[in-house]
Amino acid sequence: MRRRLLGVALAVLLTGGVVAALVLGNLGSGVTVVRGVIGSEKKPFFDDPQVKAAFAKHGLQVEVDTAGSREIAGSVDLSTYSFAFPSSAPAAEKIKKERGVAATFAPFFSPMAVATFEPIVATLTQAGVVSGTTFDIKKYLEIVDKGTRWDALPGSAYKARKRVLLTTTDIRTSNSAAMYLALTSYVANGDDVVTGADTQVAERVAPLFLDQGYSESTSEAPFEDYLAMGMGKTPMIMVYEAQYAARLFANDGTIGPQMRLLYPSPTVLSKHTLVPFDENANKVGRLLTDDPEFARLAARHGFRTADPGVFAGLAKGTPLTRDLVDVVEPPTYDHLEQLVALIEERYL
């Protein structure tokens, strides 16, 4: 009995010693927790164990919450975060001005793209909307203007009675939908960037969103529907190229043989821009921008970085395009906000 009691006592002491050592070790490790709020499309990057390990080498533990990028700029309480990391430069610029931040970081970017399926590509090629991997926004708008349905297109392999529409997120909350609005409003405005609440432009582009029905608030959910539910539910969807590219690079089987990626003409670049609120966030921004290890990890998650060779190396032999030609600038945040407000007031 005495031996058993002594054994138990020793076990308690040893266990306590181990716990104490772990606690003291953690306290002395010098790890700094940095919290940020990000667009949902970057969550897999920040959740990547290799990314976490790379930050840990520099004494950082980066924890993130997600929200729609327009929500980050407009309604999220940023007082509890060290940084905001929306998916567009205009949204970041608004946050920068409101918070009085001196400088921002744009470590990576992604062009907007259309994720679809081979039968849809064949149908839209015959309709003159698609050529190769190019999705002509002007010709697409002409089809939408007529209220064309999929089963009415000549030779359509997709017999649904639904209207020919891209699936997007909600323009009131999500940056990917706002970027879609930026490029469609550019074409609707006579190939010019909108500079406010233009009634004629709003009237033309509103059906692109109104006729979809319910829209998700962030870009992650509709892309998962595209991957899991196929053409029946989501014949074509507006995505960040990075979402599609990350699955290709992972070679995890989620990109099936009938799936295709098209590039809108014109397109816009989603410039993922980190707005730091303190020095720890500045350190995160510098690492993401300047450290080759983070550039390599970002490219593996589908993002393009300042070193084009990293992404190009991964994209070799895939349908991803290396050179982007027809790229336009999005409107300023305030001008885009005015157009969204007009569409919401009159049509949504």
Image (cartoon, rainbow, N blue to C red):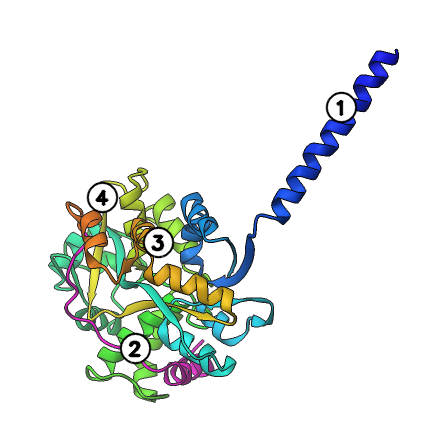
Q: Quadrant of the C terminus?
A: bottom left
Q: Are marks 2 and 1 in contact (CB under 8 Å)?
A: no
Contact between marks 4 and 2 (CB within 8 A): the answer is: no
**On residue 294, which mark appears?**
3
The disc labelled 3 sits on which kind of residue? Phe
Residue position for label 4? 258
- Please state the extent of the stretch shown in magenta in the rendering: 320-348
Q: Secondary structure at mark 3?
A: helix
Dot 4 or dot 2, earlier in sequence: 4
Looking at the image, do the residues carrying marks 3 and 1 touch, with CB atoms under 8 Å apart?
A: no
For marks 3 and 1 on the same chain, the one whose residue lies earlier in the sequence: 1
| Comes first in the chain, label 3 or label 4 | 4
Asked whether disc 3 touches disc 4, contact meaning CB atoms under 8 Å apart, the reply is no
Precedes in sequence: disc 4 or disc 1 = 1
Contact check, label 3 and label 2, Cβ < 8 Å: no
Residue wearing tag 2: 330
Identified by mark 4, the residue type is Gln
Counting from the top left corner in percent of width and height, residue 66 is at: 50, 60
Mark 1 residue type: Ala
User: How dense is the environment of label 2, judged by Cα within 10 Å: few (below 14), some, or many (20 and up)?
Assistant: many
| Separation of marks 3 and 4 at Cα, in angstroms | 32 Å
Q: CA distance from mark 4 to mark 2?
A: 31 Å
Q: CA distance from mark 3 to mark 2?
A: 27 Å
Residue topped by disc 1: 11
| CA distance for labels 2 and 1 | 65 Å
Q: What whole-number distance in Å separates the C-alpha atoms at marks 4 and 1?
A: 60 Å
Q: Which residue does the image show at 48% across and 68% down from the upper left?
A: 84
Q: Nearer the viewer, residue 240 or 82?
A: 82
Given the image, on which type of amino acid does mark 2 rest?
A: Pro
Could you classify mark 1 by the number of other residues whose Cα lies within 10 Å: few (under 14), some (14-19), or many (20 or more)? few
Nearer the observer, disc 4 or disc 1?
1
